[in-house]
């Protein structure tokens, strides 16, 4: 009887680990090529995460402070939704977005129980598929933007002049920043991680990824990528990092001098400060602040700023009244408007605590995930990174990093 129960339990664990593996494959295949395939990561990740969260209660006691800050933020998210329920737009979609945050907690349990040494072959396939998706997205996006042809159907269509990969330049570039930083880490740690990827595929993806980034003309994502790589170099060699950082600072100061003195009409990253692109973002910042003043404690509710912008701009006579239905283009202002000062407090606390845990954690967290984390603070000033695509990547990074942190801390 006891032996039979043990066998059944082992089967369940293996099945749950299969769900975890499928979830990771959904991310690798779809994060850079589809807005729907990564949903499989949530589906299968939630199944394994819930199972282990219920089955292994000891992990709850070991969760670090950042995880508890995230749990409290989720509570504030729900409280904001309940308070604003009767006034919210797209209520089910808005409240349903709590899944992204919940995934960050639950998938920690999945990764902790995932037998990484036994899955080296699967992880290698997964990483290579992710790299191939970068190659395909870059090539297809450039063909679409340059020649206005869809290479998948061979039909002429109208595409934006900025490279958007498979699904649009903003999502493409702001997700690509994390992948470029990740690939840079793989190149630096090539000898240590050589069993987990194919070098030729990596180099090809890296080159095409950079071409794709520049072709997207997305300034915030480019700055985030540069800063993340700078942090990586500094962690590996402080002296070289400081020299590189000094050189980048000089270049940035020169760029700012150009931007504030008329800018450039040919190079988008150097366009003048008062260009329509910049003033549109400023109008969103102002809208978020006015939204906060209206509901300072719990905000307007999850993902509600975009539904309030038109009214706020009209009533406060803000610029760009035609630019509506958009987020704040800033992760902190967006959370301030949606969840109020209480939500912003715990969101920021979560980010800070996560950073301290990364810095005092394993080599993997320090040299792979910490540089990606650093990019959030830079690109997050000009873009809301926690849309569907961004949340998939950021919360996966979080759950993997915390699982690694706990493994090291408790020597599991």
Image (tube, rainbow, N blue to C red):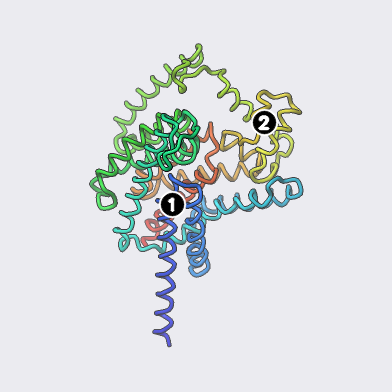
Q: Secondary structure under badge 2?
A: helix
| Relative horizontal placement of residue 197, taking residue 396 as reference (left or right) | left
Q: Which mark is residue 278?
A: none
From the image, tell me which residue sits under label 2.
287
Spot occupied by residue 293 in the image (x, y as percentages of width and height): 72, 34
Q: Quadrant of the C terminus?
A: bottom left
At horizontal 44% and vertical 45% (from top left) the residue drawn is 33
Q: How far apart in space, not on screen, are marks 2 and 1 (Cα)?
A: 34 Å
Along the viewing direction, whichever of 87 and 227 lies nearer the viewer = 87
**Extreme residue in the front direction:** 155
At horizontal 48% and vertical 68% (from top left) the residue drawn is 56
| Among numbered discs 2 and 1, the one appearing first in the sequence | 1
Spot occupied by residue 151 in the image (x, y as percentages of width and height): 40, 39
- Residue 77 appears anywhere in the view: no
| Relative horizontal placement of residue 291, taking residue 23 as reference (left or right) | right
From the image, tell me which residue sits under label 1.
27
Along the viewing direction, whichever of 149 and 59 lies nearer the viewer = 149
Task: Say few, some or many: other residues with alpha carbon within 10 Å of mark 2 (under 14 / 14 to 19 / 20 or more).
Answer: many
At horizontal 68% and vertical 45% (from top left) the residue drawn is 301
Q: Secondary structure under badge 1?
A: helix
Q: Nearer the viewer, mark 2 or mark 1?
A: 1
Spot occupied by residue 226 in the image (x, y as percentages of width and height): 39, 31
Q: Is residue 371 above or below residue 217?
A: below
Q: Quadrant of residue 113?
A: bottom left
**Extreme residue in the bottom direction:** 1
At horizontal 44% and vertical 67% (from top left) the residue drawn is 16
**Extreme residue in the left direction:** 191
């Amino acid at each position: 009887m006891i032996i039979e129960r043990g066998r059944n339990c082992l089967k369940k664990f293996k099945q749950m680990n299969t769900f975890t593996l499928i979830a990771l494959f959904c991310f690798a295949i779809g994060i850079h090529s589809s807005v729907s395939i990564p949903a499989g990561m949530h589906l299968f990740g939630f199944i394994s995460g819930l199972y282990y969260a219920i089955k292994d209660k000891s992990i709850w006691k070991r969760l670090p402070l950042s995880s508890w800050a995230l749990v409290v933020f989720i509570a504030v998210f729900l409280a904001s939704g309940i308070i604003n329920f009767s006034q919210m737009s797209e209520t089910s979609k808005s409240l349903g977005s709590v899944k992204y945050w919940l995934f960050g907690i639950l998938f920690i349990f999945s990764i902790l129980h995932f037998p990484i040494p036994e899955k080296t072959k699967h992880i290698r396939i997964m990483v290579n598929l992710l790299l191939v998706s970068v190659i395909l997205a870059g090539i297809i996006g450039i063909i679409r933007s340059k020649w206005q042809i869809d290479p998948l159907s061979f039909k002429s269509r109208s595409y934006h002049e900025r490279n958007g990969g498979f699904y649009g330049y903003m999502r493409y570039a702001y997700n690509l920043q994390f992948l470029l930083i990740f690939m840079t880490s793989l190149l630096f740690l090539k000898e240590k991680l050589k069993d987990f990827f194919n070098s030729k595929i990596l180099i090809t993806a890296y080159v095409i990824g950079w071409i794709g980034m520049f072709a997207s003309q997305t300034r915030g994502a480019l700055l985030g990528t540069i800063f993340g790589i700078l942090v990586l170099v500094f962690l590996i060699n402080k002296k070289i990092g400081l020299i590189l950082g000094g050189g980048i600072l000089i270049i940035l100061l020169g760029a700012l001098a150009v931007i504030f003195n008329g800018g450039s009409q040919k190079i988008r990253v150097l366009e003048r400060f008062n260009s329509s692109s910049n003033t549109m973002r400023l109008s969103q910042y102002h809208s978020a602040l006015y939204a906060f003043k209206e509901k300072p404690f719990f905000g307007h509710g999850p993902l509600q700023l975009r539904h309030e912008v038109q009214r706020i701009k009209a009533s406060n006579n803000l610029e760009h009244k035609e630019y509506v239905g958009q987020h704040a283009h800033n992760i902190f202002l967006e959370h301030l408007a949606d969840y109020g000062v209480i939500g912003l407090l715990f969101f920021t606390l979560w980010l800070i605590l996560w950073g301290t845990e990364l810095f005092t954690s394993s080599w993997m967290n320090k040299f792979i995930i910490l540089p990606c984390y650093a990019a959030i603070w830079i690109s997050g000033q000009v873009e809301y990174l926690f849309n569907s695509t961004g949340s998939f990547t950021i919360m996966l990074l979080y759950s993997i990093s915390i699982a690694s942190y706990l493994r090291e801390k408790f020597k599991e």
